[in-house]
Image (spheres, rainbow, N blue to C red):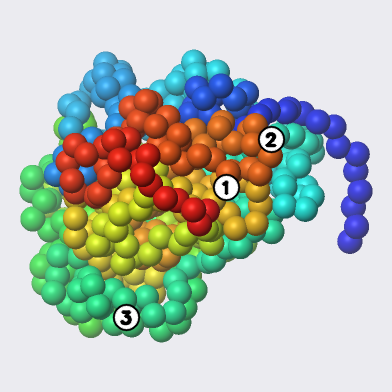
Amino acid sequence: MNFSVNLTTLKRADVVVVGGGAAGTCAAIAAARGGASTLLVEQYGCLGGMMTLGLVMPLSAQASKSGLSFGGILHEMLDRIVGLTKEYCGGEGKPHHLFSSPHVMKYVLLDTAVNSGVDILLHTTLVDVVRVGNRIEKLVVLSKSGLGVIEGGVFIDATGDGDLLFRAGEDYVLGSEAGVMDRLTGAGLNKVHMEERAYGNYEQDGLLQPVTMMFTMGGVDVERARPLVNRRLRFADVGLTREEFEKLPYANTPGFVVEGDELPLPQGRVLFFQNRRPGEVVVNMTRVTGINGADALELTQGEIVAQRQVFHVVDFLHRFIPGFERAYLLETAGILGVRETRRLVGRHVLTGGEAIDCAAFPDVVAHGSYIIDIHDPQGRRKAIGGPIRGDCYDIPYRSLVPKTVENLLVAGRCISSDHVAHSSTRIQGTCMLTGQAAGTAAAMARSLRGGVAEVDVVALQEALLQAGVQLFRRSGEAGKRVATVAAAADVADL
Ligand SMILES: Cc1cc2nc3c(=O)[nH]c(=O)nc-3n(C[C@H](O)[C@H](O)[C@H](O)COP(=O)(O)OP(=O)(O)OC[C@H]3O[C@@H](n4cnc5c(N)ncnc54)[C@H](O)[C@@H]3O)c2cc1C
């Protein structure tokens, strides 16, 4: 079917960021502070994406494993988040694994972006891209005002799903590659977290981590429940028989299919995190496999199954887990939690091996430190992976840079990494850092004819350092900042 319509230009900016999650908001703030007129386009009515609407409260990878802060906009926001959460939501802050309030996050992200000069367009969804040669000229968006056009100089894809790079015809990959498990086995990380069980091979390639509907509960006696958290449980561990479980109304529905003597829970375990208020927890126990979160039909199916699972999990916790007897459901996430969809295949694909071994890159623009954390794409085994081998790993600028489109950068969950590295780079602190790097680079690239690949990486690193981002020359070497040695860096293959 052909459909033609005249479109008017809604907005125009030097830098246009699509996606107002952790990565996109930091990208827009950095671009605006870098002097570029900056537009941030977001499909929902608030900023934060997974960290607000998705109720993903642990803001991980704020620092290296030994506690060296990664700095930047991330850290600038943390003090405000802790202060406002205490003032408005009660509870106590934690220094390295902060549990933020999604309500406070919404406010802090929006307020920081507005104060930094970012022009924000909410309730607006990217639907198409006008690409001429190797440049993006315009975006087609849909909003309450109908279809419209956004013009820009440099664009940043921070949609998590790579919607912009996909619509621009840039190279991408979806899910796992061949040989993932072999490489993990070689690294000794083919173990289920905290267990010595080796993980079987993936049965096929292109597998995606499962989706999860997060929710919160109150009235939990956390200390009584704690001994059962994050363990492989059998029926007998909660005083049940298989036959008794099979009488539950949700037995043998998706996620609760009875096999063997292990308790059939969607995540294979009881998993929650204590929130800042006494008795409140964030529950990460729903799981739907085989869902491509970049496909509307599959996403809808995932929502239906996961929203049902919430009530089934709450029922199970009430009945069988000590400490949950009087607990109550507080809130379910407004959007399904999607861990993995499209990833850019950029100038450099950060591999799991490089992340695990903390390989150093001369064009480092961000660090990550989170464990390799692959939630079982095929079922209910917990998660596979384990800690990286050094203090933190480098993310090179080339992992944000596409191979063909000259005026596009990518930030957050969809940067150029393989399935294994992605399981760590997708974490919120790391997304905020790649966002800041992309935004800073985009502001610098707006006056370069050759686009983002022409950005002087040493100048970019210097700008990031000036903005308080901590870049370490070699991962794990405390205090040796990139700027002191970057002048000698040879980053020729962009
Ligand atoms: C269940 C679950 C548990 C997790 N647990 C943790 C944890 O414990 N600690 C941790 O640090 N991280 C955790 N993560 C990972 C982390 O939350 C996300 O990977 C991270 O927040 C992604 O940030 P992002 O900005 O790249 O993407 P998102 O947060 O997804 O933001 C993308 C934004 O783009 C918008 N958007 C998308 N498409 C379009 C479009 N076409 N047009 C306009 N706007 C669009 C979206 O609405 C969204 O606001 C978890 C993730 C999940 C799903």
Give the x, y percent position of residue 472. 27, 42
Q: Earlier in the sequence, mark 2 or mark 1?
A: 2
Q: Nearer the viewer, residue 98 or 69?
A: 69
Mark 2: which amino acid?
Answer: Gly
Q: Earlier in the sequence, mark 3 or mark 1?
A: 3
Label 1, on which residue? 453
Decide: is 6 above or below 321. Answer: above
Mark 1: which amino acid?
Answer: Ala
The answer to which quarter of the image holds residue 36 is: top right
The answer to which quarter of the image holds residue 437 is: top left
Decide: is 355 above or below 411. Answer: below
Numbered mark located on residue 153 in the image: 2
Residue depth check, mark 2 versus mark 3: number of the one nearer the observer: 2
Q: Earlier in the sequence, mark 2 or mark 3?
A: 2
Label 3, on which residue? 182
Separation (CA) of disc 2 from disc 3: 42 Å
Mark 3: which amino acid?
Answer: Asp
Q: Secondary structure at mark 3?
A: helix
How many C-alpha atoms fall within 10 Å of the one at disc 1: few (<14), some, or many (≥20)? many
Q: Is residue 16 visible?
A: no
Location of the N terminus (image quadrant): bottom right
Decide: is 168 above or below 231. Answer: above
- Left or right, 97 with reference to 363: left
Residue depth check, mark 2 versus mark 1: number of the one nearer the observer: 1
